[in-house]
Image (cartoon, rainbow, N blue to C red):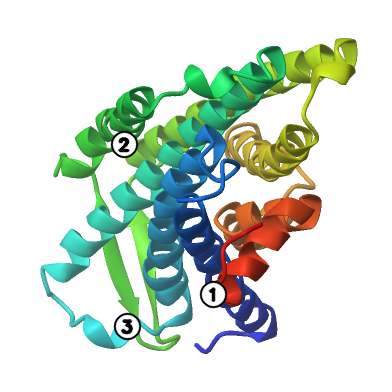
Amino acid sequence: MALNGLHTFLFSYVCVAHVLYLVLVISILRQRKTSSIMKGSFFSLVIGHYVADVIYLFEFNILMRGRKYGYLTSFFQPGSPALIIVPRISTALHYYIKIVVYIGQIVFALNRLTSAMFPINYNHIWTFKLLVVIWFFQWTVPLAAVLPINLDMNFTIKYEIYSSEGTLRLENDPVSTDIIAYIDMATSVTGTFFSFIMYILTCVVVRRDMAAQVNLELRLLTSAIIVFIVLSVNTVMQVLTILQNKVGLSGVMFINDLSYPVNDMIFTVQPWALLIFSSVIRSHIWATLRGKKYE
């Protein structure tokens, strides 16, 4: 089954967005040698988040979209061990990288809160050593949530080949399906809740002491909130999915159609949010494209 018009558009959009994302990261790395702006902790977090988004991009478009639309089917044969091994890797990687992204959202929110509370010297708090510690826990803690279920061979997680449709179907037993869904919902809700609280506090601080705020930091706050909104939509979808499956909530079947576009937005929204809301970021990127230093 070939990609339909919507998914062809989404795939094209994702490719364009990540070329832009790569240009943004190159600009940060190149310009931070001379630009004090790009040396800030926020942009270090952007680079770290880029790694997660790239993994998310390839995992989702190769393993998820490829399974649904059949361009992985030819790599599998009936009875092959790959029909059991690959779906476990795919499932583990998908939910692992989502939790990494959720944690990253909390870190961004905390970074913006400290920037509002200490607008002049907050970067002295966010030292490189602290960032390394944060990244270590961000990338290791999610393993505890996804590995036990995906390594337990008592659970059914496998592909079934549907030759008539030319696609692979992911088959899960009810227990593993529920556990995975609850893990996804719990981590998403937790990330959204704590981020929401911190963004509310940030807005309160900014409103009380607007004169002390730096314009660029306010722009970065706006872009971070935009990313948060996209992840909040994902959280709502996780909750509605649970309600649909467990209590028979009607009228929410549309979330199945939204799942792919929302996932695409999660790993592509960062560069757009920064470019749209910050002329300084645009100027840095333009300088990089011209092979010059930002002035």
Of the numbered discs in the image, which one, if any, rests on residue 135? none
Q: Is residue 263 above or below residue 7?
A: above
Residue at x 24% of width, y 49% of height: 156
- Considering only order in the chain, which callout, 3 or 2, is on the residue closer to the N terminus? 3
| 268 vs 254, nearest the viewer | 268
Callout 2 amino acid: Trp
Q: Is residue 38 above or below residue 77?
A: above
Disc 2 is placed on an element classified as helix
When asked about the image quadrant of residue 202, the answer is top right
Residue at x 53% of width, y 43% of height: 43
Camera-near label (1 vs 2) is 1
One can see residue 282 in this view: yes
| 87 vs 29, nearest the viewer | 29
Residue 277: percent from the left, percent from the top?
Answer: 79, 50
The residue carrying pointer 2 sits among few (fewer than 14), some (14 to 19) or many (20 or more) residues within 10 Å by Cα, namely some
Q: Is residue 270 above or below residue 205?
A: below
Residue 126: percent from the left, percent from the top?
Answer: 47, 23
Mark pair 2, 3: CA separation: 31 Å
**Circle 3 sits on which residue?**
73
Callout 1 amino acid: Gly
| 179 vs 6, nearest the viewer | 6
When asked about the image quadrant of residue 199, the answer is top right
**Circle 2 sits on which residue?**
139
Left or right of residue 271, residue 104 in this image: left
Of the numbered discs in the image, which one, if any, rests on residue 291? 1
Left or right of residue 200, residue 12 in this image: left
Q: Dots 2 and 3: beta carbons under 8 Å?
A: no
Residue at x 72% of width, y 33% of height: 217
- Considering only order in the chain, which callout, 1 or 3, is on the residue closer to the N terminus? 3
